[in-house]
Image: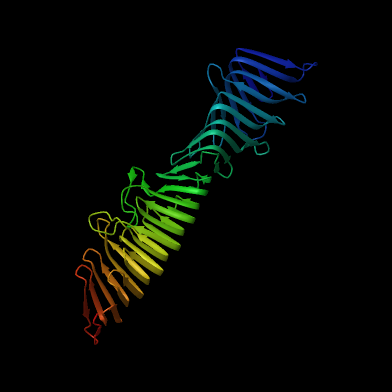
Amino acid sequence: MTHDTSRLAGDRVVAQLSADRKSLIGVEGQGHINIVTTDDAPGSGRKEIVCDHFWSEVMNGQISAINAAGEAMPVHATVAGPPARDLVAKNVRVAFTNKQVSQMRAESDVVMKELGELPREMTADHLTVFFDPNQHRAISASIEGNFHYKDPKNQASAVRANYDIIGDHVVLTATPGFDPTVTSEGQTLKAKLIDFSPRAGTAKATGEVIAQIMTKQNGPSNVSAMFPSSKPVFVNSDTVNMRQATKLAVFTGHVRAWQDNNTLFADEMQVQGMGDQITARGNVRTSLYNTGGTEQRKTPMLTRSDHFAAHKAERRIDLLGSVKIDDDQRHMTGEKASFFFDAAHKLERIEAENKIVLVEQPVGRKGTGDKATYFVTRRVIYMNGTPATVSTPNGSVSGDQIAIDLTRNKVEIMSPTSATKGTYKPQ
């Protein structure tokens, strides 16, 4: 049966006509149903439905919707593009406005595939696609229940989602007990609200963000001196913006990043590439456990600074602004410090500059200078200044350079260009 630009084929069809038999006011079909519709407008798409059973809805003398149901087989609908869409579900309802498709709703075991240059697949319990009758194309979709998304680079899951087809944005929202998740090139993102664009390769998340980042597709890799092991790195924050093209992730608000026991806190943190460079600013604090010898430390080395930068290739961490380093009962402050790590990701030495103050509580020793170098494995600290000074309860020394041997509790003055000075107070 043909009607205008539509065609219907099936095993059994019942059509209801107006009294003058000039208008089709209702139609129902059973068995091997095939419905094809084509909009009148130039460039409009072809739509086809294959099902076991269908019936129409009529409003004001015109068919306002077609309902298709799958019995032996699910309903199969195709919509011409670009991009072409392939829809499978138990039930499908197609609504019309002024003889143009305005809405397509699918229920139960829904699978929708987009077959464009970036093929993607969505599954859900309920899916509603909205069409612009003027543009004759799909503009958005609303998805409810057990939503899953997949394309060559991304995967996502949520209970509820909204799909801006024109803008190419998928917005995932949380429901009690289930937060949406997006996985992209080995990185996993979970939050209360996630807005990601598959084509642009961007993702923005807000609300209790937790991300698993800096892993390769075939498994996790070493990230930096801050996070040296092969295990994943996790990050909490209030918001995050990720961009695949530049391999940049920016976390803001109550940032906490950790791997095993190594932890970083900051107001903002940026991750470049696969952890090639990590920068943080605003009340930065770290807890480092990979600063000892071959054995794992029981207490961490703690740092505070205004800015933080970890460089993977150089195996270096830089701290800048109001730096404070606490190593058990040993404390050092300054304006700048750099941590250098060996090939095994163990701390090799610390170099600090500008207004250095070193305090060793167990022995009551205090040192000041312009620069300090702490060789961790040798347990020796070199203080440089004009002059550098070291004082203890029983005296003080000053000179160009002072070496403090922590193992032997020995202080040695080296001052090749200027005089040295020392005082001694009998106890």
The residue lying at 58 percent from left, 40 percent from top is 162
Q: Nearer the viewer, residue 316 or 202?
A: 316
Q: Is residue 93 left or right of residue 418?
A: right
Q: Is residue 93 left or right of residue 59?
A: left
The residue lying at 75 percent from left, 16 percent from top is 17
Q: How many marks?
A: 0
Q: Nearer the viewer, residue 260 or 78?
A: 260
Where residue 88 sits, quadrant-wise, is top right
Q: Residue furthest left?
A: 408
Q: Looking at the picture, does residue 8 appear above or below residue 300?
A: above
Please indicate, yes or no, whether residue 136 appears anywhere in the rendered image.
no
Q: Nearer the viewer, residue 68 or 403?
A: 403
Image coordinates for residue 190, horizontal then vertical, percent? 48, 44
Q: Residue furthest bottom?
A: 419
Image coordinates for residue 3, horizontal then vertical, percent? 68, 21
Q: Is residue 148 left or right of residue 309?
A: right
Q: Nearer the viewer, residue 274 or 237?
A: 237
Q: Looking at the picture, does residue 90 appear above or below residue 406?
A: above
Please indicate, yes or no, whether residue 300 appears anywhere in the rendered image.
yes
Image coordinates for residue 426, horizontal then vertical, percent? 23, 82
Q: Residue furthest right?
A: 20
The residue lying at 38 percent from left, 68 percent from top is 324
Q: How is the image coloured?
A: rainbow
Q: Residue furthest top?
A: 12
Image coordinates for residue 408, horizontal then vertical, percent? 19, 70
